[in-house]
Amino acid sequence: MDVPHRPGLERWLYRQSKRWWRLTGRIPDGVRTGLSVDGRPVFLVHNPKCAGSSLKRLLGVTARRTTHSWPRDLFRPSVWREGIFVVAVRHPMERFLSSWHYHCRSGYRGKLVKRHGDLSHLSPLAYFDFIQQYPENCGLQSLWVDYPSAEKPQCDLVLRTEDSADWPRILAAYGIHPVLAEAPRLNISRAGGAGQAPDPGLADGDQAALRVKVETFYRSDYLRFGYAFAAVN
């Protein structure tokens, strides 16, 4: 199956454009929550396909547009030191399948379709090869968790999507008082249902091959965030 190619120049230009926030010192409205802990502002880091829209609503982010930019591109060191940063992570296989379903099966018509045309023909295996060109869409989750600082090398609070029903209590225990009593269930895949990954519809052999690919590439996420391997040790 033919996998669309991302030009290297386009990738370079994209990376440079995202650094604009840190260079200018501006902070996008899509990460501002309006909440604080002992006078320290609370910011949302939106890791793709990890119930970010639900977390955004829970934390009271009112901006319509959000950003999936990495902390190292968004925030100056002074802002990083002074702020409280919240991010969610998810089981790597479920996150990957959610990303595939969103881009290839949901009627998505965003930037990837505008650049490459319809993606609905991509199987999960072909999509894996394709999306490696777009780490900003489905790269290692550590890209959204980490920041190049010895003083504070990662976000202050790392939530698990699997614990979303308990997010209000976890946030409150940290001193962050969400604006809602419970996390809303937004953007749930119709193919997967609440709390489930979409069914890739693969034969057993292809399913095993995909699992090996995902567990190999995202190995550090599995180990770091405490998710069990099924195929690769």
Image: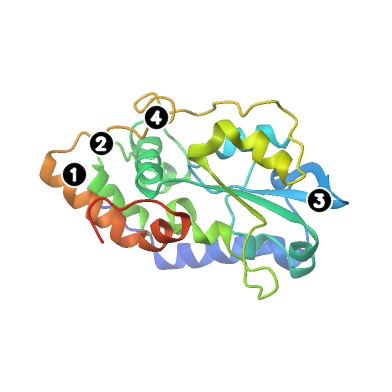
Query: Badge 2 is on which residue?
Result: 200
* Point 41% across, 67% down: residue: 8
Mark 4 or mark 1, which is nearer to you?
1
CA distance for labels 4 and 1: 23 Å
Nearer to the camera, 26 or 161 = 161
Q: What residue type is labelled 4?
A: Gly
Residue 224, horizontal then vertical, whole percent: 46, 60
Query: Badge 4 is on which residue?
Result: 107
Mark 3 or mark 2, which is nearer to you?
3
CA distance for labels 4 and 3: 37 Å
Q: Earlier in the sequence, mark 3 or mark 2?
A: 3
Left or right: 16 with respect to 134? right
Residue 142, horizontal then vertical, whole percent: 51, 60
Query: Badge 1 is on which residue?
Result: 207
Quadrant location of residue 7? bottom left
Q: What residue type is labelled 3?
A: Pro
Q: Earlier in the sequence, mark 2 or mark 1?
A: 2
Mark 2 or mark 4, which is nearer to you?
2
Q: Residues within 10 Å of mark 3 (few under 14, many from 20)?
A: some
Nearer to the camera, 51 or 173 = 173
Query: Badge 3 is on which residue?
Result: 41
Residue 97, horizontal then vertical, whole percent: 34, 41
Q: Can residue 4 be seen in this view?
A: no
Left or right: 109 with respect to 14? left
Up the image or down, 147 lies above or below 164; here it is below
Up the image or down, 168 lies above or below 160; here it is above
